[in-house]
Image (cartoon, rainbow, N blue to C red):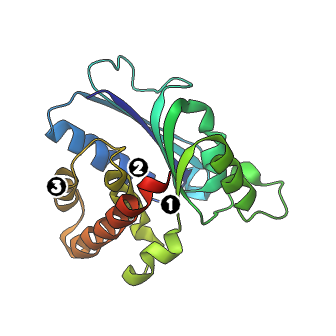
Amino acid sequence: MNKDIMICGVGGQGTVLASKIIAASAMDEGNAVHSAETIGMAQRGGPVTSHVRIGEDAFSPLIPVGGADLLIAFEPSEAVRNLKYLKKDGFVIVNRVPVKPTSLSGAAEYDGKAEIDFLRSECRCLVVDSDELCAPFGSSKFFNVAVLGAAAGTGELGISAETIRGEIVSIVPERFQEKNLAAFAAGYKIGEENYADQ
């Protein structure tokens, strides 16, 4: 399998853990993997971007502009900011819930709606609401694993759900595993049910 996956969001949303789970899962399935993170003032809510390149065709850890098969965005404006990396036929999974990143420090009002509308007009995308999805688990901090479920459910991730579940158990501390596995399952259901509409 050859696949380039970009994950973007802001500091504190768990994008790096999500990229580690994807990379480890891809390696479990026998693929070569390159990955890298670019972090800007992450502790202050700055932009965080992870590149995961799967397959023998990847000679560098960084995805070139126009090279990403899948963009997983934890935040609407970060999805728009990184859209240039998406292939013409690529797919976007984006969180509807905005978190005002430091890159939008001059904006007085920001609800993410315009960004979501723009994405829907420009590419195939699945919009997921982290507040609704994670409400049963008591925290939006489970969104990083839930959105991996959504990506697996669409089939765009290219990695089996069983492999990802194994890596969640391997990487996530034991006391958080049950909720993370439940969040992954909830995300998978959303991805599977809504992908046909894209």
**Does dot 3 land on a helix, a strand or a loop?**
helix
Q: Position of residue 71 (x, y in %)?
A: 49, 42
Residue 149 picture quarter: bottom left
**Does dot 2 land on a helix, a strand or a loop?**
helix
Q: Quickly name the residue at label 3.
A: 162
Amino acid type for the residue under numbered disc 1: Gly
Amino acid type for the residue under numbered disc 2: Val
Quarter of the image that includes the N terminus: top left
Q: Is residue 92 left or right of residue 142?
A: right
Q: Is residue 52 left or right of residue 23?
A: right
Q: Quickly name the residue at label 2.
A: 16
Depth check, front residue: 84 or 139:
84
Q: Position of residue 118 (x, y in %)?
A: 71, 48
Q: Which mark is residue 12?
A: 1
Mark 3 is surrounded, within 10 Å at the Cα level, by few (under 14), some (14 to 19) or many (20 or more) other residues, namely few
State the separation of the CA atoms marked 3 and 2.
Answer: 21 Å
Would you place residue 174 above or below residue 32 in this image?
Answer: below
Residue at 16% x, 55% y: name it: 162
